[in-house]
Each structure stands twice: as structure tokens, then as C-alpha cells.
Amino acid sequence: MRKAYWLLGLLMVMIIGAGFGYTHLQRKTEPSAMKKPLVFIIPEGYFGPVFIFYGQQDGVASEPDPLGQAVRVPPNGVIKAKFSADEVPTGDASPTYRPVWYVVEKKDGSRFIPDVLGWAGKNEDGYYEVIYLDGKGKLRTFVDKHPKETKEEDYGLWSNDRHAPTIRGRESCTYQGFNERASEQFAGEITAKEAGAPACDKFFVVSHHQFKTLPRWMWEAPAHPYGSIAELEAEADARLEKRQAYYQTK
């Protein structure tokens, strides 16, 4: 029972975050002719949270990619980018255009586009409904026709491959501070601008199977305020070591 409640709480965090991603994908603006899409290159086998911080002096530059300008997700999931958030384009996603791409790169160099979760919840008939962007850029809706008593951890049944990575919960992470006044900002006592919070986004890479089976320490920490980016990096490095040790013993 405790697992079910925790998974429901985690799911709600993902749904709230996914709302940002869905809005971003569906915003009624024209693609910018001056900007190329941002492409996240995700190494095969990676799962967990990904953070990207924009406008960092010690950050990495984007690399040319057939889909736009790319950044690679490192093992700890924390990306510091030289380019600013203003350089990331907006626009409606379609089969031929996306402002942001997520690409999984296999060890043999081949690539594929994972599904991106947009919204999940109960529809007016009481069934679980999922809205997602598939690998071909088509917005799809899946309704789970299993009994209405289906537990919350069975979200995500739209995929034929329950072990395939999916993208969930994209949102801004500026609210988490990453500055000396992060606690005040997180509590709503000061604004992000007043605190000097960096521009950043985050999302989760997880398969449906992993979503049901991952230990809670993989997910429970990355939503709290941080006093600096370095603090997040230290936590991410520790989580990486813990994850590697955990799966070596499985």
C-alpha cells in the first residue's frame, strides 16, 4: 500500500512537470527561423533525472546535429550549457519539426526517438488516459480499457515495449533555486530573479518497467531546493555511484 501511495505521488510530480512539456510542445507560436532545435543525446542505458543549466561560463557548447544543435547527457545527468535559454527555440511540434528533440543513441551509433509523455490521468469515463508525442512526431491518445480499478502504477500501458525509455516530466527547475537564497525562493518569500536563480530545465528518462520497479531514492531527492549547482552535481554523482552499486548486486 505504501508503494502504491508513493508511486501515485511520484506520478503526480511527473504529470505536473509533463504539463510544462505538453504546453511547450503545443504552444501556438511559429518556429524561429534564427534558431535550431535543441537536441538531447541520451546514451543507451541511461535512466533517471536530467538537469540542464543555461548560460554557464564553464558550460559546454552545443554540437551540430542532423536535427539541430545537440548536447549530450553525461552519466550523472547534469548538463551545464554555454548557450542561453533564449537560444532554445519554441514552436508547435509536428512530424517534421520540434523545438526540442530527445534522441537515444545506441552503443553501435544508431539512434531512435523515444515517446514523450504529455499528460496522464483519469478521463470523464473513469479510465486512465495518456496523451503523448510518439517517435514520429504525432500527438496520440491512449485510453487504458482495463478495469477502472487498475492501480496508478499501471500508467504507461500505451507502449508495446515496456522496457523502452520514455521522456517524462519536463519542466523548469528554476524554482529549486541553485543559489544561496534557495530556501527563501523555494518558500515563495523572494522571486527567482531576486535570488539570482539560473535558468534551467529538467526531465526524466524512464521506461514503464523502471517506473514500477526503481527504488524510491532514484526519484525522491531531485525536487528539493539546492544552494548551488555544485550541490546538485555532488548529489547526482553520489546517486550515480549508488545506482551502479545497486544494479551490480541485482
Image (tube, rainbow, N blue to C red):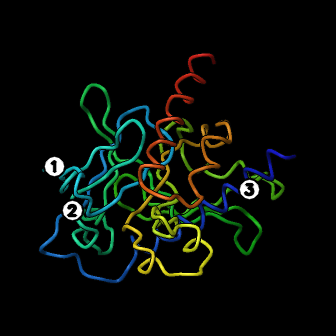
Badge 3 marks a residue whose secondary structure is helix
Residue 154: image location, x then y, percent: 70, 48
Residue nearest the viewer, comparing 188 with 111: 188
Report the side of 36 relative to 133 (left or right).
left
Density class for disc 3 (Cα within 10 Å; few <14, some 14-19, many ≥20) is some
- Residue 235 vertical position relative to residue 167 in the rendered view, above or below: above
Amino acid at dot 1:
Glu
Q: CA distance from mark 2 to mark 1?
A: 11 Å
Contact, CB < 8 Å: mark 2 with mark 1?
A: no
Badge 2 marks a residue whose secondary structure is loop
Q: CA distance from mark 2 to mark 3?
A: 36 Å
The residue that disc 1 covers is 63
Residue 180: image location, x then y, percent: 48, 64
Q: Residue at x 50, y 51 (%)?
A: 204
Q: Foreground mark, 2 or 3? A: 2
Residue 101: image location, x then y, percent: 31, 56
The residue that disc 3 covers is 8
Density class for disc 1 (Cα within 10 Å; few <14, some 14-19, many ≥20) is few
Badge 1 marks a residue whose secondary structure is strand
